[in-house]
Image (spheres, rainbow, N blue to C red):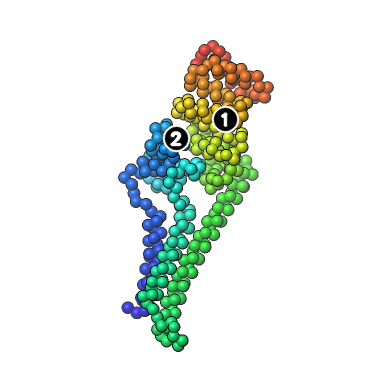
Amino acid sequence: MSDRARSLTTATLIVVMAVALLFLISTRPATVNRVEEIGARIKCPVCQGESIANSPSPMAEDMMDLVSERVAAGFSDQQIIDELLSSFSGALLLDPPPSGNTLVLWVAPVAALVVGLAVIVWWKRHPGPAEKVSVSPSGQRSRTRLLTGGLILVATFAAIVVLAGNSLQDRAASASGAADLGDQDLADVSNETMEAVIAANLDNPQVNGMRLALAERYFEVGDYRSAFPHYLVVAEDVEAAPTEAITALVRLGWMAYDGNGEVETATRLVDEALAIDPGSSVALYVRALIGWCGSGEAETATQIFEGLLGDPELDRETRTRVESDLRLAREGEDCQ
């Protein structure tokens, strides 16, 4: 084999090796039970360190049902995980891998190192008389080898720089998109667009307003599954404004009761909201409803309703609803 053919063959093998490394790292073997495997990687939101696959909580069961639906629909593991975590904090991922968008940036330096080592080994095994001052044919071939290896390394690291630059530009564009939407009337923004912007700004507390607006849309139509993760993120955000945290906790409490019948969990969540603002009319009203409807505490509910009616700032719609509930509670009727 000629030196030129051998050089081309070696360079081709190096490129193939780098591509194979990228492929092996970016893929995972199929599992026997994909639903259980995916569920084992997601932390149960209302449990102590348990995955949704191991938790008996109704909320965890709902999340597992979603995983089953997506697996049956042919979604990939990463697509399912991204959907579950698109509105959750990163802490809910028990085994966080490098994200799909940054995987190449993790792998590229390793691939570059492998390529460099391979070129060095190649040079060691195929030395040329580079030390000679005269430009002999063999010396020319040696310099050709050195040039080929150098070009491969330069191209590899140039690719890393380009990928890193594109990644940073994507992040900047996402942040810019969030800022632009923040200046718009969200009534004109679709749920899908809001979901995309939120997913691109998971660590930005300024997106909480959009989270709550989207969650309220889901809540109003009874789509608790879609609303839940957005409320949860706001409730767990230590930088959230008090009004935001109260809204999220109260909604989570009502969904825990109305959606899953979890009276204790619902009560605890609403009590957390009342700890932030004991005079919150929304939190007090929901607390009274949960106690009355869930535990038959009509007397306690009556006292809360009477206190709410004494608030001169209570809006007319809420006042009408509280008056109706108060009448039923005083007469010993079941909540409606």
Above-or-below relation of 286 to 140:
above
Q: Give the residue displayed 40% in from the left and 75% down from the top.
A: 123
Above-or-below relation of 34 to 158:
above
Asked which secondary structure carries label 2, the reply is loop
- Mark 1 vs 2, N-terminal side: 2
- Pick whichever, 65 or 113, lies toward us: 113
Q: Position of residue 112 (x, y in %)?
A: 44, 64
Q: Is residue 79 left or right of residue 324?
A: left
Q: Give the residue displayed 45% in from the left and 28% down from the top.
A: 260
Q: Give the residue displayed 45% in from the left and 70% down from the top.
A: 152
Q: Position of residue 8 (x, y in %)?
A: 38, 73
User: Which residue of the protein is positioned furthest toward the top in this rendering?
Assistant: 331
Q: Which residue is mark 1?
A: 273
Q: Amino acid at mark 2?
A: Cys
Label 1: how many Cα within 10 Å (few below 14, some 14–19, many 20+): many
Q: Which residue is mark 2?
A: 47
Q: Can residue 316 be seen? A: yes
